[in-house]
Every structure is written in structure tokens, then in C-alpha cells.
Image (cartoon, coloured by chain):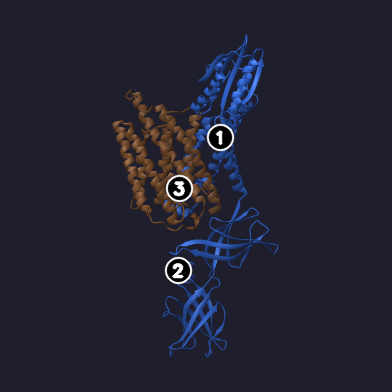
Chain colours: A blue, B brown
Amino acid sequence: MKSFIRFFSSVKLAITLLIIITAASIIGTLIPQQRGLEEYLARYGQWANLFHRLQLTRLYQSSWFITLLLLFSINIITCTLTRISPKLRRLFRPTIASEAKKILAYRIKDKYKKPWKLERSEEEIKKALSSSHYRLKEENKENKTFLLARKRTLGWFGSDIVHFGLLVILAAGVVSGFGAFRSYLTLSEGQILPVPQSNFQIRLDKFETEYYPNGSVKDWKSTLTVIKEEKSLLTKTIEVNHPLSYEGHVFYQSNYGLDWRNPAVEIWVKKRSDSSFLRKVEAKIGEKISIQDENIQFSVTHFIPDFVINENNQITTRSLQPNNPAARIEGWQEDKQIFSGWIFAQFPDFERIHSTKETDLRFELKDFKTSQFSVLQAAKDPGVTWIWVGSAFLMVGLTLAFYWPSREIKMILEETKGTTEIVAGGLASKNREAFQAEFEKIMSHIRRSK
Amino acid sequence: MNESTLFLITFIFYILAAFFYFSFLFSKKENKAKKGFKLAFIGIAIHTIALILRTFESGHAPFTNMYESLSFLAWSSILAYIIIEWKYKIRKAGPYFMLIVITLMALASSPLMPKNATPLIPALQSYWLWLHVSVTLMGEAFFAIAFITSIMYLVASSKEKKGKAKKSSLSSAILDSISYRCVAVGFPLFTLGGLVFGMVWAFYAWGRPWSWDPKETWSLITWFVFALYLHTRIVMGWKGWRSAFIATLGFLAALFTYFGVNYLLAGLHSYA
């Protein structure tokens, strides 16, 4: 156990670990993380398998990197514990009595005789020290009084508080690693979805994209309602940087897209023999439409935003962008299908219609309307709060460590025949010049007082 | 007068300041350095107006693309230098430091940097933009001074060893301690702005405080290097060339975080 403590409390270990973790972190930025094996094979060839086996492709989540962090945490804990107990003793049970020889070995010191009795000297000195905000401890021995005056002793613990904060952040990381749950919800307007790992649902009331005058996207806004047991509890419009929080679940505007499941399609019906003939029809998918004065019904059976025929000769969409919109139509006459085929918005003359009966009608795909869907990231991460707590400790600790330097003045007052000899010395953890000035001010105040 | 004119005037003042600082370096006349300091001071005053104008023109924080960010880093650097020179009277660092500032200004004015103010993309529309970037860059400015004084330390100490040091020159011990004090200012600022505010913003914008994005990781690496600097110095008593060496590494890591990551590594921070 002792050798365990000795091993883990060494600063050399801390520095070695720090260097190894830094080096590992650098490697992790040079190799792209969490990609598919094919990408690594293409990029690194033979090496890809080795990288994969060494977990370099998901380095920050790898068992060896986490082991390093764990060792580092144990190191921080033992270092802090072994260093904090002498500090606590120094704070609560300091040795007050000292020897004049020791005090006079300090870099900042003074020695002076005053024609005062001990009580009088004590009183004056205490007043001077207190007015400079020092807190006093004293010990009396026959004709001697030992004084210990200190301030900003919290500064000693700055580094410990920093380390504590770091440990809290690391622990928060562990909590997040085991307890965090993230999912993506794709919602069209009006749609309700249950939120994973919760007892409520979320509804997208409205989704809109705002644009700048130059056409670039200004913001995506989703109006969301939290629904629990069929009651609407909360409505909020979220946008990028402004998520919705409810019972530990946070909803972020993450992505958006066009919803092609239910478009409205505008079709112009023309006649080959009569150029004045025009019927504008707005159709939903599957809706049967009769054309006025003609003994024909038709419907749009499919809509594809980016029409392509793939290598298996199947009709599919290349993307979700309307790059090559196409609609499949069917026509009937008295319950008998007479034609079916594809029409293209960008190529009105290029029609692929198979007819079983000649028809005079032509169909053009003129326009289409669709709603957008919004993609939300739903996150439940119980570690996050602890990251903020740890960060607060980290910053308080750093401030104390750098800008709250402790100061300590030790004094021995010794009375012989109505005269008191004052021996004083001071220690400061930082900024000695300022401390020296303060020390001299206190001492000269005592010298001058009558 | 518009922002780009003011930027140009600022640049001229910084160049003049550098000129006087260098003539101080060669002539050893104190009043040249004082003139350099005054010119830098006027420069930063005009620069401040330029940044404010930019903010009003664009309607957002003046550090959303590389041009703005370089200009702001130059501003932070001058501010940090003015504070340090006023406090520690290290005029000798002036000429070298002004070289860094002029490099930043020159990079900002290079034709490769698009200067027009573009509307903010959704991810950047947050007041955390102000806090995260300004505090981080301020911290990095102090790292830059620590770097300059560390290099000066290395030169001064080698001269002292050979007995070539002149009486007028700054002693290596002073340079070592100023370098430490700059790290003592830069480190908490960098921790707060770069890491803590960065995590808070990442949480609001991306849904998680830490994603091991290359820029995040490199800022952590920078933080580790300066943590190493502080521990070796305070606990193990390393001073002098070893401290100076680590401070230099730390500055290079900060530089890579700021610059290199954007051009060499792809990630979430692709906008700046």
C-alpha cells in the first residue's frame, strides 16, 4: 500500500502521464476518428488494420486511452491527498512558537526594541496587523508572546481546488459515457413522436427557415410542444444555439430536409389537337381526378424529387433535393386503365407513357409543393451539470492559486525590564515586493507609535 | 471614415511603433522606445474604433472570419503588451513583439483573407461567440508575450554564460519571471475562454460540451503543455531554459490551435 501511494503521489508520474496523454491526443487529431473501415483502407492501405487493432481510429474512446485517464485521475487524487493534509494542519493547528534565529533567517524581517511593557506591545501590534486584515493566533510563555498573523490562507488550496474540479469533470465524463442517451427525431409539421427514455411526447407545431436578404440561411426555427398524457405542457420555439430543456432532456435544432412523402403536385393537362385547351390540376398522391368535359380520370401514383434509374434498372431518387422531379401518372376510362408512365418537370417533351388506347391528352408536371421536416437532436446527459460544477471549481481554484497569494508574519515579543524586543519575519507565496511594502508599513507604524 | 481605412491607419501606426522600437534597440535611446509605446497606444485607440465600427457595420462580434479574428488577435496582443510593458517596463521585448503584431496585421490584410462582412451563419448566432473568442484570444496574446520573453531569455542566458552580456540589457532572471507572469495571466484566461466557455457554447450549439473535435483537442493539448510548464516550474523547481522551452512549445501549440487546425485538420470548427 505504501509503495502504491508513493508511486501514485509522485509528480514525475503526473508529468509522464501528462506527456503521454498529450502525445496520444495529438495522434487522435492526425488520424480522422470514427470513420468506416473502407475509408481507412483507402487512406492508409495496409496500416489501416493495425490502426484499427490499436484502436487509433476511435482513440478517445479506446480502452487504453481511458486507462491512461484513469491512472491520471488516481495520480491526481493521491497527489492532492498527500499534499493537502500538511496544509490543513498548518491551517488549523499551526506551530506558533518559533525561535528568533529562524525568523531572522527569513528574507523579509525586522528587529526592534520598544520601551513598552509586553501587554502594551501586544495590543499595538495586534491593532496594526488586524488593520491590514491579518488573522492572529498567539501563544504565551512566561515573558514571551509568539504571534502568527496570516491572511489569504485559502490561496494554499488553489491548486487542490483546481485538481478537485478536474476530477469532477473527469467523473462527469464517466457519467456521460454510461448515462448519456442521444437520438435524432425527424418530424414534419403536426407530427407527434415519443421521446426515447422519457414518459412524454413532442410535437412539431411549425418549422420554418429564415433567410438573409442575400439568400443565405439565417436560422431554422422549430416550434415544439411537450405533451404528457395528452396534455400540452410547454411550447417553445427552438433554433440553433437555443435548445428546449424539459426534465433533463434537451432538444436541439439539428438538421432539416424536404418531406417528399406527401407532396402536392400541379399538373397541366393539354390537348395535342387543340392548343387553347388547358386544365390546371392540383393533385395529391393517389387522388383520382376527373378532367372536365373529358371522359378520362387520372391520378399521380408516385413522385420522385431526383429521378434516376440505378444499375439494377430500378427507379429511385438520387437525393432529397428536387434536382430532377418526376411524377408517375395513370389514366382510366370507365374503370379501365388506358395509360401509365412518367413525366418530368424539366423535360416536358420527354414523356414515357405507355398507352393501351390512343388519347389526345398531354400531361405536364408544372410544380410541386412539399413541407419541410425538422431533425431534432434529443439529448439526455446527466454528466453535463457536473461538468459545469467541475469548471466552476477549476476557475475558482485557478484564481486562488494565481491571484490570492497567502501572507504570513511570525513575531516574537520578549520583555526584559520594561522594554519589549520585537522580532518579526514574513513569508509570502507570491508577489514578494508588495508584501515587503506591507510588512514595512506595519513595522514602521509600530515604531512610530508612542 | 470606414473600417478598412481605419484598419490601414492602425497598421501604419503599428509599423511606425515597430520602427521606433527597433531604433531604440540599436541606438539604446530610451525616448525612442517611449515614442514607440505612444505610437502603439494611438494605434490601438484607432484599432478599437475600427473594431467598434466593424461591429456596427456587420451587426455581429468582430471575429467571425479569419480577417476579423486576426485583426482582433492583433488588438488583443497590443493590449496585452501595453499592460505588460507598463507593469514591468520591459521595453526590450517591444521590437520583437511588434513583429508578431505586424505579421498578424499583414496576414489580415493579405488578399487571401476575404474581408467583406458576411451575415452570421446560424451556429455562430450566440452571445457565447463574444465570450468564447475574446477571452481565448486575450489568453493567447499573453502566451505570445511569454513566448517572446522566453526566446529573449534563451538568448540573454547564453550571452551571460559567455560573459558577453551588457549592463544595459535585461537580465535573464527578470525575463524568466516575466515569462512566468504572462503564463500566470494567460493560463486562467485560456482555461476560461477556450475550455470552459467553449464547452458551454458547444453544449448549447451542438448538444454536447465536448466532442474531441480537432480544435477542441488542440486547445486541450495547449492547456496540457502549459499545465506541464506550471507543474515542472512550481513543484519541481524547473526554471530557466527548460521553462523557456516548454513555454515556447505551449505557444506553438496555441498557434497551431488557432491557425493550423483550420487549414490542416477538418472538424466542427470549420468556420474560424
Check disc 2 and report the residue beneath it. A311
Check disc 3 and report the residue beneath it. A31
- Left/right placement of residue A401 relative to residue A226 reads left
Most foreground residue, B259 or A141: A141
- Left/right placement of residue A296 relative to residue B116 reads right
Q: Position of residue B5 (x, y in %)?
A: 35, 52
Crowdedness near tag 3: few (<14), some (14–19) or many (≥20) residues, C-alpha within 10 Å: some
Answer yes or no: is residue B159 visible.
Answer: yes
Q: Nearer the viewer, mark 2 or mark 1?
A: 1
Most foreground residue, A99 or A441: A441
SS for callout 2: loop
Q: Earlier in the sequence, mark 3 or mark 1?
A: 3
Residue furthest front as drawn: A450
Up the image or down, B106 lies above or below A4; here it is below
Q: Chain of mark 2?
A: A
Residue drawn at (31%, 37%) of the image: B20
Three-letter code, disc 2? Glu
Residue furthest top as drawn: A417
Instruction: Determine the CA span between mark 3 and mark 2.
Output: 34 Å
SS for callout 1: helix
Up the image or down, A135 lies above or below B210; here it is above
Check disc 1 and report the residue beneath it. A400
Three-letter code, disc 3? Ile
**Mark 2 vs 1: CB contact within 8 A:** no
Numbered badge on residue B106: none
Q: Nearer the viewer, mark 3 or mark 2?
A: 3
Q: Chain of mark 1?
A: A
Q: Position of residue B76 (x, y in %)?
A: 43, 43
